[in-house]
Amino acid sequence: MYLTPEVKQQIFTEYGNSATNTGSAESQVALFTHRIKHLTEHLKKNKKDLSTKRSLINLVGKRRSMLEYLKKQDIERYREIIKKLGIRK
């Protein structure tokens, strides 16, 4: 599987500032981004996989909502996570 507990732990440590900080907006956005990249690669190979396409659209919406929340709460944290992840905005 592409998202092992070790990979999740690494994402949370890098973006959430600790391995146990799994609920912070930054760590959630980073996790969504990792999953979005994986699903995008999958869809490049399997163009007719509609359930994956639906999942990808849902994930992008969740990430966008989380980023909007982060922008309202603290614009500096928002700018930092956008720059770290390389998300176009």
Image (tube, helix red, strand yellow):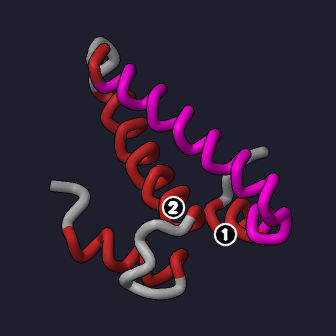
**Label 1 crowd bin: few (<14), some (14–19), many (20+), radius 10 Å:** few
Q: Say which residue appears at 50% left-offset and 81% top-offset.
A: 14
Magenta segment's dominant SS is helix
Give coordinates of residue 5: x percent, y percent: 21, 70
Give coordinates of residue 73: x percent, y percent: 78, 60
Count of labels in the image = 2
Query: From the viewer's perspective, is residue 49 above or below residue 39?
Result: above
Q: Label 1, secondary structure: give it.
A: helix
Give coordinates of residue 26: x percent, y percent: 58, 66
Please report contact status of discs 1 and 2: CB closer than 8 Å, yes or no.
yes
Looking at the image, the residue that sits furthest to the front is: 73
Query: From the viewer's perspective, is residue 44 above or below residue 28?
Result: above
The stretch drawn in magenta includes residue 62: yes
Give coordinates of residue 49: x percent, y percent: 27, 17
Image position of 82 (left or right of 57): right
Foreground pick, 79 / 73: 73
The circle drawn on residue 49 is none
The stretch drawn in magenta includes residue 72: yes
Image position of 52 (left or right of 69): left
Q: Say which residue appears at 61% left-offset and 48% top-offset.
A: 66
Identify the amino acid type marked 2: Ala
Q: Nearer the viewer, mark 1 or mark 2?
A: 2
Q: Say which residue appears at 66% left-offset and 69% top-offset.
A: 84
Looking at the image, the residue that sits furthest to the left is: 1
Q: Label 2, secondary structure: give it.
A: helix
Q: How far apart are marks 1 and 2 (CA)?
A: 9 Å
Mark before the other along the chain sequence, 1 or 2: 2
The residue to which callout 1 is attached is 84
The residue to which callout 2 is attached is 30
Q: Say which residue appears at 71% left-offset and 60% top-offset.
A: 82
Q: Magenta part of the protein: which range?
A: 52-79
Foreground pick, 71 / 38: 71
